[in-house]
Image (cartoon, helix red, strand yellow):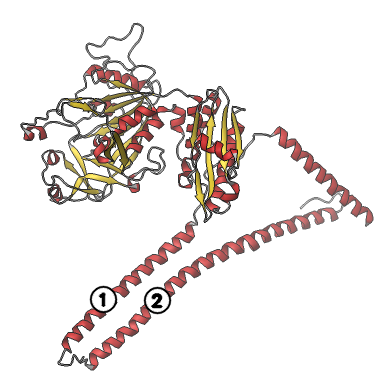
Amino acid sequence: MTKRSTLGGATLLALALLFIGLTVLFNFTLRGWRADLTQNRLYTIAPGTERILRSIREPINLYFFFSDKTAGQLPQIKTYGVRVREFLDELAARSNGTLRLHEIDPQPFSEDEDRATELGVRGVPVGATGGQLYFGLAGTNSTDGKKAIEFFDPNKEQFLEYDVVQLVYQLANAKKPVVAWMSTLPMGPGFDPQSGQMREPWVIYGQAEQLFDIRPLEPTATRIDPDVNVLVLVHPKNLSPATQFAIDQYALKGGHILAFVDPLSEADSAGNDPRNPMASMGADKSSHLGELLSAWGVKFDATQVVADRGHALTVSMRQGEPPVEHLGVLGLDKSSFARDDVITAGLSNVNVAVAGHLEPVKGAAVKFEPLLESSTDAELLPVERFRMLFDPATLHEGFKASGERYTLAARVTGDVHTAFPAGAPAGVTLPAGTAALKASARPLSLVVIADTDLLADYLWVHQQEFFGQRLVHAWASNGDLVLNALDNLAGSDDLISVRGRATFTRPFERVEKLRRAADERFHDKEHELEQQLQATEQKLTALESKGGGAQGSLIVTPQEQEEIEHFGQEKIRIRKELRAVRAGLDADIRRLGMEIKIVDIIVIPAAFALLALAFAAWRRRARRRPAGEPRP
């Protein structure tokens, strides 16, 4: 008996030593190995991220500022902080030493807090004492360049990978991206012949100039420089075949294009004649890019406008007249935005005016993803109804919603074919030794928006003069939409491929389903009760009118008194049912919680215990079996 105990203790000691040895061995030999078993692959980085990390040539320092103690007051922030830290550790581990991660917990009035502010990470006051919560990321490169995510918003968790990788990419490629800007609308600074004064640039154009290397491109251009990162096409109307061919070849080389087309551009002043306003209103103010969009897998009909009763804004057509709902001027909200695309991430509202719609070309090999959509309370109307529109109320005449959501903006990616299968058009001479591309050498990245007016200042900013300075206040997210698109397209194909991911937090789907079902029953009963109460008030009012006498006495017949008493009993019964519905909701949730606890605490451990007992019984039987006896 003693010998068996000694052998058992020695065996346990040997197993413990073996376990420790294997742990130390695996810690060194399997360093960097990962196994992501989460349902949504939360800890698996995108292939584009892997390629960006491999492309880094010089070290980048990342400073993760996180106020650990202050975050303890906010469980959601605390949990998300762990998620961010783990993701940053994963990037650093996969970067082969090019990403150097520094984790800093800035204390109040410390040098670390000053460092956070200097690098662009802001503190957020938390609690009654106003303690600062720092939860951001700053990065620096070898050329003194710096970028920052000033605060990690838990509501943008699905874009965590993109935001961090974009910061790394911008530090690794510090040069401003080149944006070639072709517009037939007067967006840039210049001389306005109608006012006889210098014209200020549109606000969005000025903002883009601060972030990118903007190169104005004339609508007659026949060449696009090879170092252009993004080509912007605003209201491209009446482009020559030579210009379209240059755009076509740029697209086939894997170009990144942001295009704004329109069935009726209110900002288009072409053909305007102050002496004959009626003739100006009838001028063609559409743009469509013709066969180029078709070759890129996009169908756009410039003769149709999206009228949307669900998002219509009220406008004033003339001074002194009351505002009226305009089915063509739309205020899009979050329900209209793509939820998993970085371009529409964080937008609050986007305003468009007389916008068209986009569709994928049937059979096209490209990927067509809507970015902005109408509501289902929408219909397509002919553009002629908007050309000489004096009273927007007339748009409601004959309006009948189709129940379909129309795409107002879309992202298109993939391989495409040329719009010039017969070769270069007449008058175009290719450089010696080169041939026109017939198909994509690299995939096209295109964002197309079926409205140009969303760029105009009046749809998204307020401006005022203050001591000679122009102050701008944005009341819509139009500018953010455009800058997000430029930011995304200005990156490499690898950065563009990094898309939104699933969130770390998981909802209690069954609990929410139970709650919604009970709420529906509750609201139905509540509505029934309100109807009963309304009927009672009407009945009492009628009785009071009937009984009005010299002394205001109330005369109620026995039948009416019986009805009132009956209703009182019904009201009590309905209120009991309302309480029962709410109690039933809580009971269902408690029952579900109890079932989960029973499974976790009793069923699963019991199953493991039974398996262990069965295995032990099998071992005992094997030991007792005489030598040479065949196994069962």
| The residue positioned farthest toward the top in the image shown | 432
| The residue positioned farthest toward the right in the image shown | 2
Q: Is 524 situated above or below 292? A: below
Callout 2 secondary element = helix
Q: Residue at x 33, y 41 (%)?
A: 477
Residue 244 image point, x, y percent: 26, 20
Q: Quadrant of residue 37?
A: top right
Q: Residues within 10 Å of mark 2 (few under 14, many from 20)?
A: some
The residue beneath circle 1 is 534
Q: Is residue 617 left or right of residue 443?
A: right
Residue 370 image point, x, y percent: 34, 39
Amino acid at the residue labelled 2: Glu
Report, in whole angstroms, how far the alpha carbon at label 1 lies from the one at label 2.
19 Å
Residue 374: in sight, yes or no? yes
Residue 27 image point, x, y percent: 72, 37
The residue beneath circle 2 is 577
- Residues 225 and 603: in front is 225
Amino acid at the residue labelled 1: Gln
Residue 414: in sight, yes or no? no
Residue 221 image point, x, y percent: 26, 17
